[in-house]
C-alpha cells in the first residue's frame, strides 16, 4: 500500500494534472481577494507536477521549492481553495497521515514562502515530539502535518506557556492499536496516542490527560 502512495514519476504527475478538481469558495470573501494567492499557489503546483524546478523557483522561495519537491506521496488531486494567504491541495483517493491531508502553501506577495505537507514519519516518538514542538511554536499547520484534526484541536485549546509548568518527554509505550507517548508535568501527564505503521507512517490520532 505504501509503495502505491509514493510518487511514481511522470505517470502520477500526469494523473494528478488530469484529475485535479476545485473546491467551492473557502469563505464569503470577494473572489478578487483570493485570486492572487490562488494563482501563485497553482503556478507552483503545476511546476512541481511538471518537475520543473526553474519554473517553481520563479514563484516560490528556495525553501518552499525544496519542501514541495520532497513530498513523499503522490500528488494531491483537489484544490481546496485559500483561507487568507494559505492555499491547500488535498487528497481524495488516498489516505495519508495527519489532518493536513496534502499540501498547504503560504503565499506572500507574488511568491510561495512556505510549504506545509503531510509527513511520512517512521517512529511514534517522532510524531509525538514534532507535534509538541509545533504546539510550542503555536504553528497549527505544522501540527497538522503529523496529527489528526481532532488531536490538534485538543492540544491547541490551551496555548503553550514557556513560563508555565515544565513538560518532560517520557518516551512511548505500546497500547492497544498503537503507542502512547507521554509528556509528564507537575500534577499530571499528557498522553499522545499514536497510530499507524512504519510503512504507512505514524500520526498522533488523539490526546488525553492524566492527573496525579
Image (spheres, rainbow, N blue to C red):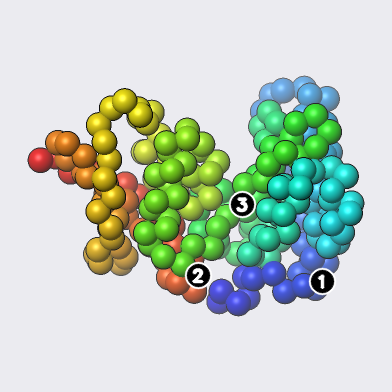
Question: Horizontal placement of 110 versus 164: left or right?
Answer: right
Tag 1 near tag 3, CB within 8 Å: no
Q: Nearer the viewer, residue 27 or 172?
A: 172
Q: Which mark is residue 207?
A: none
Question: Horizontal placement of 74 versus 143: left or right?
Answer: right
Q: Nearer the viewer, residue 121 or 93?
A: 121
Disc 1 target residue: 10
The picture places residue 200, in percent across and down from the top left corner, at: 50, 70
The picture places residue 31, in percent across and down from the top left corner, at: 80, 27
Q: CA distance from mark 2 to mark 3?
A: 15 Å
Q: CA distance from mark 2 to mark 1?
A: 22 Å
Dividing the image into 4 quarters, which one contains the N terminus?
bottom right
Dividing the image into 4 quarters, which one contains the C terminus?
top left
Residue beneath the point at 35% across and 27% down: 161
Q: Is residue 150 visible?
A: no
Image quadrant assignment for residue 17: bottom right
At numbered mark 2, what does the secondary structure look like: helix, strand or loop? loop
Disc 3 target residue: 117
| Disc with the residue nearer the chain's start (2 vs 3) | 3
Q: Is residue 159 visible?
A: yes
Q: Nearer the viewer, residue 95 or 72?
A: 72
Task: State whether residue 165 is above or below residue 97.
Answer: above
Disc 2 target residue: 200
Amino acid at each position: 500500500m505504501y509503495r502505491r502512495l509514493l510518487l511514481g514519476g511522470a505517470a502520477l504527475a500526469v494523473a494528478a494534472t488530469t484529475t485535479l478538481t476545485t473546491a467551492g469558495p473557502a469563505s464569503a470573501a470577494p473572489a478578487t481577494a483570493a485570486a492572487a494567492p490562488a494563482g501563485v499557489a497553482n503556478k507552483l503546483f503545476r511546476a512541481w507536477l511538471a518537475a520543473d524546478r526553474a519554473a517553481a523557483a520563479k514563484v516560490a522561495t528556495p525553501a518552499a521549492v525544496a519542501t514541495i519537491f520532497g513530498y513523499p506521496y503522490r500528488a494531491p488531486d483537489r484544490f481546496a481553495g485559500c483561507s487568507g494567504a494559505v492555499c491547500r491541495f488535498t487528497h481524495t483517493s488516498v489516505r495519508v497521515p495527519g489532518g493536513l491531508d496534502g499540501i498547504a502553501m503560504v503565499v506572500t506577495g507574488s511568491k510561495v514562502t512556505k510549504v506545509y505537507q503531510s509527513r511520512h514519519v517512521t517512529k511514534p516518538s517522532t510524531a509525538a515530539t514534532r507535534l509538541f514542538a509545533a504546539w510550542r511554536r503555536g504553528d497549527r499547520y505544522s501540527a497538522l502535518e503529523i496529527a489528526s484534526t481532532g488531536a490538534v484541536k485538543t492540544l491547541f485549546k490551551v496555548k503553550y506557556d514557556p513560563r508555565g509548568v515544565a513538560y518532560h518527554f517520557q518516551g512511548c509505550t505500546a497500547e492497544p492499536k498503537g503507542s502512547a507517548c507521554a509528556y509528564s508535568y507537575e500534577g499530571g501527564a499528557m498522553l499522545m496516542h499514536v497510530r499507524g505503521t512504519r510503512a504507512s507512517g505514524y500520526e498522533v490520532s488523539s490526546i488525553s490527560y492524566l492527573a496525579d
